[in-house]
Amino acid sequence: MWRELRMVAFYRAVFAEILATAIFVFFGLGSELNWPEKPSVLQTAITFNLAAATAVQIAWHTSGSHLNPAVTLAFLLGSRISLARAACYMLAQMVGGIVGAAVLYEVTPEDIRGTLGTSTVRVNVSSGQAVSIELILTLQLVLSYLVSTDSSRNKGSPAIMIGVSVALGHLIGHYYTTCSMNPAKSFGRSVVVGNFTKQWIFWVGPLIGAILAFVFYSFVLHHDPKTFAERLAILRGSYDAEPSEKEKDQPTDSQESLR
């Protein structure tokens, strides 16, 4: 663990998570503002699609572009990153969420910014239903992350796939909870506007969805041959495996943890 924390690349990756998350939150929330010409659900979904794809592409080779504590949790459980990296990524994502929301708040006229489209549960949707829909939406998002970033199956950037998954979630989730799928996004704008109403829903749902995504991918959809010793080494940040020829062209999260 201490070895990893001494690497410059580790802090570069943490900063990349702050920057990429801030960009995602700024543009995503910007599509939900209450302008005279109110954006449609489709417009908001497309904007979040483009924001996610752009942010992922920006930080992909530096940090893996998680942008989301739920994604980081799944990667930690799947032995793709160390415990120290996961903790720092989650903190960085929350900071990025606050920064992105704060900048948007400051550059937007007072009569337009309102609550920055704060994540809210619709009046006729119960808390249980809200948690369930956030769980399902995040489940498909994290599965998309796990599949598209698996270096044994995909060699290119996962930006497009992840962007489509984010848009899909917004097309459905908007009608239930205005769609979070990302605790850092909901937390960031809640901090800026000072509204934490039912904030727990936007943590519990996505985090449980991430855990289920890890279980489905690791034990049903894909077999990971890592040994217990290798998993423990990754968790500690001391994994020293030599990348294969197939993997050299594409960095993975576990390889990033060595830098």
Image: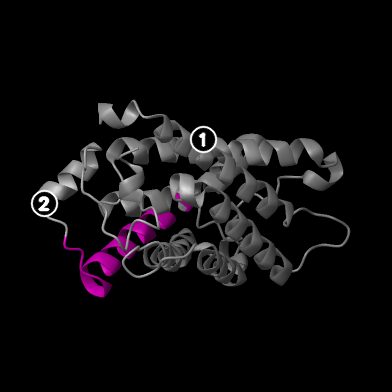
Q: Tell me the residue at 30%/48% (across/down).
A: 254
Does residue 161 appear anywhere in the picture?
yes
Which x, y percent locates residue 88? Answer: 40, 35
Which x, y percent locates residue 236? Answer: 22, 37
Which x, y percent locates residue 72? Answer: 39, 49
| Amino acid type, callout 2 | Phe
Residue 228 — which label?
Answer: 2
Magenta-drawn segment: 202-225
Q: Tell me the residue at 44%/50% (across/down).
A: 64
The quarter of the picture where residue 113 lies is top right
| Left or right: residue 134 compared with residue 112 | left
According to the image, label 1 marks what residue?
A: 15
Mark 1–mark 2 CB contact (< 8 Å): no
Q: Secondary structure at mark 1?
A: helix
Label located before the other in sequence (1 or 2): 1
- 102 vs 20, nearest the viewer: 20
Q: Tell me the residue at 47%/52% (across/down).
A: 201
| Amino acid type, callout 1 | Phe
Pointer 2 local density, CA inside 10 Å: few below 14, some 14–19, many at least 20:
few
Distance in Å between CA atoms under marks 1 and 2 = 30 Å
Image quadrant for the N terminus? top left
